[in-house]
Amino acid sequence: MIVILRKIFSRVSNIKTNRISKTPKAEFTRIRHEFEDHLQAINENTNEISSNYEYICEIGNKLEKLSERVEQMQLFLEANNSYAFERKNEFDVKRLNRREQDVFLVIYTLEEEQGSITYSDIAQRLHISEQLAGNYVTSLIEKGVPILKRYVNSRPYLRIEPEFKTLQTKENILQLSLAEFGF
Protein backbone atom coordinates (compact mmCIF):
# COMPACT_ATOMS: atom_id res chain seq x y z
CA MET A 1 0.00 0.00 0.00
CA ILE A 2 2.81 2.40 0.78
CA VAL A 3 4.32 1.68 -2.59
CA ILE A 4 1.03 2.49 -4.31
CA LEU A 5 0.65 5.73 -2.35
CA ARG A 6 4.19 6.73 -3.23
CA LYS A 7 3.50 6.14 -6.93
CA ILE A 8 0.26 8.14 -6.76
CA PHE A 9 1.93 10.94 -4.82
CA SER A 10 4.87 11.09 -7.26
CA ARG A 11 2.48 11.17 -10.25
CA VAL A 12 0.38 13.93 -8.66
CA SER A 13 3.47 15.98 -7.80
CA ASN A 14 4.84 15.46 -11.35
CA ILE A 15 1.52 16.65 -12.80
CA LYS A 16 1.53 19.75 -10.54
CA THR A 17 5.15 20.60 -11.36
CA ASN A 18 4.50 20.12 -15.07
CA ARG A 19 1.52 22.49 -14.87
CA ILE A 20 3.52 24.98 -12.84
CA SER A 21 6.54 24.77 -15.15
CA LYS A 22 4.38 25.11 -18.29
CA THR A 23 2.38 28.07 -16.97
CA PRO A 24 5.36 30.38 -16.28
CA LYS A 25 6.95 29.42 -19.60
CA ALA A 26 3.77 30.26 -21.44
CA GLU A 27 3.39 33.51 -19.51
CA PHE A 28 6.98 34.54 -20.12
CA THR A 29 6.58 33.75 -23.82
CA ARG A 30 3.39 35.81 -23.96
CA ILE A 31 5.09 38.71 -22.14
CA ARG A 32 8.10 38.51 -24.47
CA HIS A 33 5.79 38.73 -27.50
CA GLU A 34 4.06 41.77 -25.97
CA PHE A 35 7.43 43.44 -25.35
CA GLU A 36 8.46 42.74 -28.94
CA ASP A 37 5.21 44.32 -30.17
CA HIS A 38 5.80 47.37 -27.99
CA LEU A 39 9.41 47.63 -29.16
CA GLN A 40 8.27 47.51 -32.78
CA ALA A 41 5.68 50.25 -32.13
CA ILE A 42 8.32 52.40 -30.39
CA ASN A 43 10.73 51.95 -33.31
CA GLU A 44 8.01 52.92 -35.78
CA ASN A 45 7.15 56.03 -33.71
CA THR A 46 10.83 56.93 -33.42
CA ASN A 47 11.22 56.71 -37.19
CA GLU A 48 8.14 58.86 -37.70
CA ILE A 49 9.35 61.47 -35.20
CA SER A 50 12.78 61.50 -36.81
CA SER A 51 11.37 61.98 -40.31
CA ASN A 52 9.05 64.77 -39.05
CA TYR A 53 12.00 66.53 -37.40
CA GLU A 54 13.99 66.34 -40.64
CA TYR A 55 11.01 67.72 -42.54
CA ILE A 56 10.61 70.62 -40.09
CA CYS A 57 14.34 71.41 -40.36
CA GLU A 58 14.06 71.39 -44.14
CA ILE A 59 11.08 73.77 -44.01
CA GLY A 60 13.00 76.05 -41.61
CA ASN A 61 15.96 76.18 -44.00
CA LYS A 62 13.68 76.95 -46.93
CA LEU A 63 11.98 79.75 -44.98
CA GLU A 64 15.35 81.20 -44.06
CA LYS A 65 16.47 81.16 -47.71
CA LEU A 66 13.17 82.71 -48.75
CA SER A 67 13.57 85.45 -46.16
CA GLU A 68 17.08 86.20 -47.42
CA ARG A 69 15.84 86.37 -51.03
CA VAL A 70 13.01 88.72 -50.12
CA GLU A 71 15.47 90.99 -48.31
CA GLN A 72 17.79 90.95 -51.33
CA MET A 73 14.91 91.85 -53.61
CA GLN A 74 13.84 94.63 -51.28
CA LEU A 75 17.36 96.05 -51.13
CA PHE A 76 17.70 95.83 -54.91
CA LEU A 77 14.40 97.57 -55.51
CA GLU A 78 15.17 100.28 -52.96
CA ALA A 79 18.63 100.84 -54.46
CA ASN A 80 17.18 101.24 -57.94
CA ASN A 81 14.39 103.56 -56.75
CA SER A 82 11.96 101.48 -58.76
CA TYR A 83 9.93 100.62 -55.72
CA ALA A 84 8.98 103.00 -52.98
CA PHE A 85 7.72 101.68 -49.71
CA GLU A 86 4.72 103.51 -48.44
CA ARG A 87 5.05 103.83 -44.73
CA LYS A 88 3.53 106.12 -42.24
CA ASN A 89 5.79 108.79 -40.87
CA GLU A 90 3.55 108.92 -37.88
CA PHE A 91 4.10 106.27 -35.28
CA ASP A 92 1.52 105.68 -32.59
CA VAL A 93 3.63 104.65 -29.61
CA LYS A 94 2.26 104.30 -26.11
CA ARG A 95 4.20 105.55 -23.11
CA LEU A 96 6.98 103.17 -22.01
CA ASN A 97 7.82 102.31 -18.43
CA ARG A 98 11.37 102.74 -17.14
CA ARG A 99 12.53 99.19 -17.87
CA GLU A 100 11.07 99.26 -21.39
CA GLN A 101 12.94 102.52 -21.97
CA ASP A 102 16.13 100.81 -20.79
CA VAL A 103 15.57 97.93 -23.22
CA PHE A 104 14.82 100.35 -26.07
CA LEU A 105 18.02 102.31 -25.39
CA VAL A 106 20.08 99.13 -25.29
CA ILE A 107 18.66 98.07 -28.65
CA TYR A 108 19.19 101.57 -30.03
CA THR A 109 22.81 101.86 -28.89
CA LEU A 110 23.91 98.28 -29.53
CA GLU A 111 22.42 98.38 -33.01
CA GLU A 112 24.74 101.28 -33.76
CA GLU A 113 27.72 99.27 -32.52
CA GLN A 114 27.06 95.80 -33.91
CA GLY A 115 24.04 95.86 -36.21
CA SER A 116 21.34 93.36 -35.32
CA ILE A 117 21.26 92.24 -31.69
CA THR A 118 19.84 89.29 -29.78
CA TYR A 119 17.95 88.82 -26.55
CA SER A 120 21.22 87.61 -25.09
CA ASP A 121 22.87 90.96 -25.88
CA ILE A 122 20.07 92.83 -24.10
CA ALA A 123 20.14 90.43 -21.15
CA GLN A 124 23.90 90.82 -20.70
CA ARG A 125 23.78 94.61 -20.87
CA LEU A 126 20.89 94.94 -18.39
CA HIS A 127 21.81 91.95 -16.18
CA ILE A 128 18.47 90.21 -16.71
CA SER A 129 17.49 86.81 -18.14
CA GLU A 130 17.06 86.28 -21.89
CA GLN A 131 13.43 85.35 -21.32
CA LEU A 132 12.79 88.61 -19.50
CA ALA A 133 14.56 90.51 -22.28
CA GLY A 134 12.27 88.78 -24.79
CA ASN A 135 9.23 89.74 -22.72
CA TYR A 136 10.30 93.40 -22.69
CA VAL A 137 10.86 93.37 -26.46
CA THR A 138 7.38 91.89 -26.94
CA SER A 139 5.98 94.62 -24.69
CA LEU A 140 7.75 97.29 -26.76
CA ILE A 141 6.30 95.88 -29.96
CA GLU A 142 2.81 95.74 -28.42
CA LYS A 143 3.15 99.41 -27.44
CA GLY A 144 3.90 100.37 -31.04
CA VAL A 145 7.70 100.53 -31.14
CA PRO A 146 8.59 99.17 -34.60
CA ILE A 147 11.20 96.56 -33.79
CA LEU A 148 12.09 94.27 -36.67
CA LYS A 149 12.87 90.63 -35.94
CA ARG A 150 14.82 88.44 -38.28
CA TYR A 151 15.37 84.78 -37.51
CA VAL A 152 18.66 83.11 -38.36
CA ASN A 153 19.00 79.48 -37.30
CA SER A 154 15.87 79.89 -35.16
CA ARG A 155 17.47 82.75 -33.23
CA PRO A 156 15.83 86.18 -33.37
CA TYR A 157 17.95 89.20 -34.32
CA LEU A 158 16.48 92.62 -33.57
CA ARG A 159 16.68 96.03 -35.20
CA ILE A 160 14.72 99.21 -34.89
CA GLU A 161 12.96 100.27 -38.07
CA PRO A 162 15.29 102.87 -39.68
CA GLU A 163 12.58 105.49 -40.26
CA PHE A 164 11.48 105.28 -36.64
CA LYS A 165 15.07 105.48 -35.46
CA THR A 166 15.64 108.64 -37.50
CA LEU A 167 12.39 110.15 -36.29
CA GLN A 168 13.20 109.22 -32.68
CA THR A 169 16.54 110.96 -33.02
CA LYS A 170 14.95 114.11 -34.46
CA GLU A 171 11.73 114.34 -32.49
CA ASN A 172 12.23 112.13 -29.42
CA ILE A 173 8.93 110.31 -29.98
CA LEU A 174 9.40 108.21 -26.86
CA GLN A 175 10.21 111.26 -24.75
CA LEU A 176 13.41 109.76 -23.38
CA SER A 177 15.63 111.83 -21.20
CA LEU A 178 19.15 110.70 -21.99
CA ALA A 179 20.54 112.46 -18.92
CA GLU A 180 18.29 110.26 -16.82
CA PHE A 181 20.03 107.19 -18.29
CA GLY A 182 23.55 108.51 -17.89
CA PHE A 183 24.15 109.53 -21.53
Image: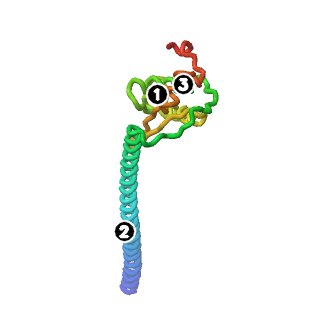
Tag 3, which secondary structure? helix
**Residue at numbered disc 2:** 36
Comparing marks 1 and 3, which lies closer to the viewer? 3
* Mark carried by residue 168: 3
**Which quadrant of the view contains residue 99?**
top right
The amino acid at mark 2 is Glu
**Residue, x 63% and y 27% (percent of image)?**
95
Task: Report, in whole angstroms, how far the alpha carbon at label 2 lies from the one at label 3.
Answer: 67 Å
* Mark carried by residue 92: none
**Residue at numbered disc 1:** 122
Comparing marks 2 and 3, which lies closer to the viewer? 3
**Residue, x 42% and y 39% (percent of image)?**
81
**Which quadrant of the view contains residue 93?**
top right
The amino acid at mark 1 is Ile
The amino acid at mark 3 is Gln
Q: Is residue 114 left or right of residue 87?
A: left
